[in-house]
Image: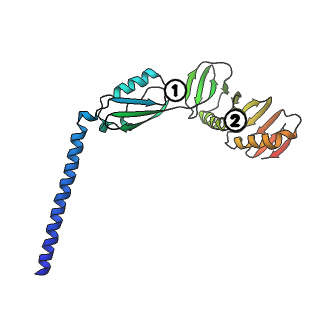
Amino acid sequence: MMKKSGFLKIALVTAIFALLTGGVVWAAAGIVKMTGGSKYFLVKTVNIQGVIRTDRAKVDAFARSLAGSNMFDLEEKKLPRIDDIWVEKIEIKKIFPDTVKVIIFEERPIAAVRIGKECFIAAASGTLVPDKCTGGETVMHKGTEKEQLVSFLKIYDKTPEMHGSRALLKPMHFELVVDGVLYKCGYDESVTEMFRIYSSRISGRYARVDYVDMRLRGKIYVNGVKNVSG
């Protein structure tokens, strides 16, 4: 009999707990629903950061589209896109009760590139933004793929010695002239370290250097004769 009484007590406590928990959940859901529908949480201020090259008119139109929206309904994945080639991604930060900070991440330009008769600004991601030709662009040889372009941009970005030099991108390697010396390089990121090694340890050994070949990983050939290991 005592065992039965104990069981009934446990069952009663469990039932009461379940009712209380359900009530709390229901109450919380009700608060969120009422808060979400309140005009107090409508967007009144939109702050924009990160605009350098993006069309300002398009940014302003985007900001206006957010005004009046409910703070609880705003999600980055559901935001309208800013139709501008410079925009890489957008992030938002909600500052309750009614302010939204929009951070625009733009494509980062690396080099001017010429493909055929057309010129572009190449971003780090490989995105090509149409631009005017000035005559100092890096040239993509026929047959060179975007994969090679992206690899070149990574190398160029990390190798200060290359900055300001005009390169010729070929399917298997690229060439550029730095301080009167022709460099032939493979599309391997180790080229950055090889440039450093050549500048600090090797270049001073030669009275004259016509060209340096870095097409093989870890190998630096000077004037096509001397094979210097990196």
Cα separation, mark 2 vs mark 1, equals: 24 Å
Q: Which is more toward the observer, 221 or 34?
A: 34
* Residue type (three-letter) at the residue carrying disc 2: Pro
Tell me: residue 139, above or below residue 76: above
Instruction: From the viewer's perspective, tell me whether residue 230 is left or right of residue 15.
Output: right
Name the disc covering residue 44, or none. none
* Residue identified by numbered label 2: 160
* Residue identified by numbered label 1: 52
* Residue type (three-letter) at the residue carrying disc 1: Ile
- Disc 2 or 1, which lies upstream in sequence? 1
Farthest bottom residue in view: 1
Q: Which is more toward the observer, 17 or 230?
A: 17
Instruction: From the viewer's perspective, tell me whether residue 58 is left or right of residue 18.
Output: right
Write down the quadrant of residue 160 in the picture. Answer: top right
Picture quarter with the N terminus: bottom left
The secondary element bearing badge 2 is classed as helix
Circle 2 packing at 10 Å, graded few (<14), some (14-19), many (20+), is few
